[in-house]
Image: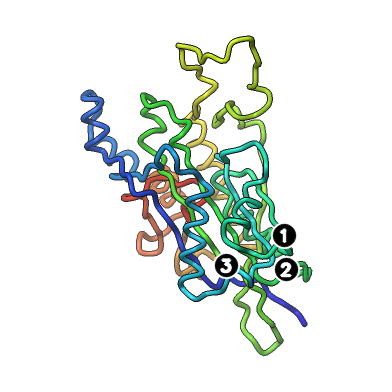
Amino acid sequence: MNLQATITAIEYHLPSEELTNEDLCASFPDWSMDKIEKKTGIRTRHISGPDEFASDLAATAAQKLFASGACKPQDIDFILFCTQSPEFLLPTTACLIQDQLGIPCTAGALDFNLGCTGFIYGLSLAKGLIETSQATNILLLTGETYSKFIHPEDRSVRTLFGDGAAATLVQGKETSKSTPNEGIGPFIFGTDGGGGKNLKAECGGVRSIKFSKSDLPSEEPSKENHLYMNGPEIFNFTLKVVPQCVHELLSKSRLTLKDIDLFVFHQANAHILEHLRDKLNIDKSKFLLVLEHVGNTVSSTI
């Protein structure tokens, strides 16, 4: 039996607390509400509560998926969880989610740490597991709470990012020569670790752990404890690399730009996306732009 990996259901969950442009401008009168919206395309972001973490958001999204009737917890045989904001170094967050959701102990579970590309990588991992007969019903979870390590006065990132999570059910479907190809893929991969200095959060890794005789926190907040982003470098990288990847993927799929009904890119911000659309010469009617009420939720944007 040949199985083809197929997306069969998607659900999402957003924290109840909202941070609007009006809220930001009330706290920082020198900020322009109109300028924020024009530059980012964002009006509102959802922010996780003090005791609300990426695993909680992801588990709630998964519970919505189960409630929809797409499948039952006992049907899941593998969990993939993408996050860059786990609440613990260990244990593996996917394992905690397995227990929380009542998924069988026979299921596989792993975390992977990726940002904007997380959902696409997750789909590729799910495809590999299904089409090599390692799993049949995969729960792909993406969840982020970037707000927890964004400095409250860093307007370059505070205006962009929102918290949220998504749950995607990827299942193996039987295929034959007579059935249409509805599967996932193909994929284009690429890595440029040299750009790591342009988007980083040094907190949380063992390199940043410094033990001392005192457990008292420093009065001066360290830059290492917050997200850093070099916006211009990210912008330049996107416009240089993403169009190349689009053309390479189309070639691999034996398609052209005109064959595509809808382009769904990572929802970084409106400024980048509009420049990308112009560079690729994509009609607005075929180009998805949906950040207005959620912001950039990293691996959950798509």
Q: Nearer the viewer, mark 3 or mark 1?
A: 1
Residue drawn at (55%, 66%), measured in percent from left and top?
256
Residue 287: x and y, percent? 40, 59
- Give the residue type at disc 2: Ala
Marks 2 and 3, how far apart at CA:
12 Å
- Viewer-proximal residue among 245 and 35: 35
Q: Secondary structure at mark 1?
A: strand
Q: Which residue is mark 1?
A: 108
**Circle 2/circle 3 CB separation < 8 Å:** no
C-alpha span from label 3 to label 1: 15 Å
In the displayed structure, 67 sits above or below 219; it is: below
Q: Which residue is mark 2?
A: 135
> Which quarter of the rendered picture does the N terminus lie within?
bottom right
**Badge 1 amino acid:** Gly
The residue located at (57%, 41%) in the rendering is 86
User: Could you tell me which residue is drawn at 61 percent across and 44 percent down?
Assistant: 114
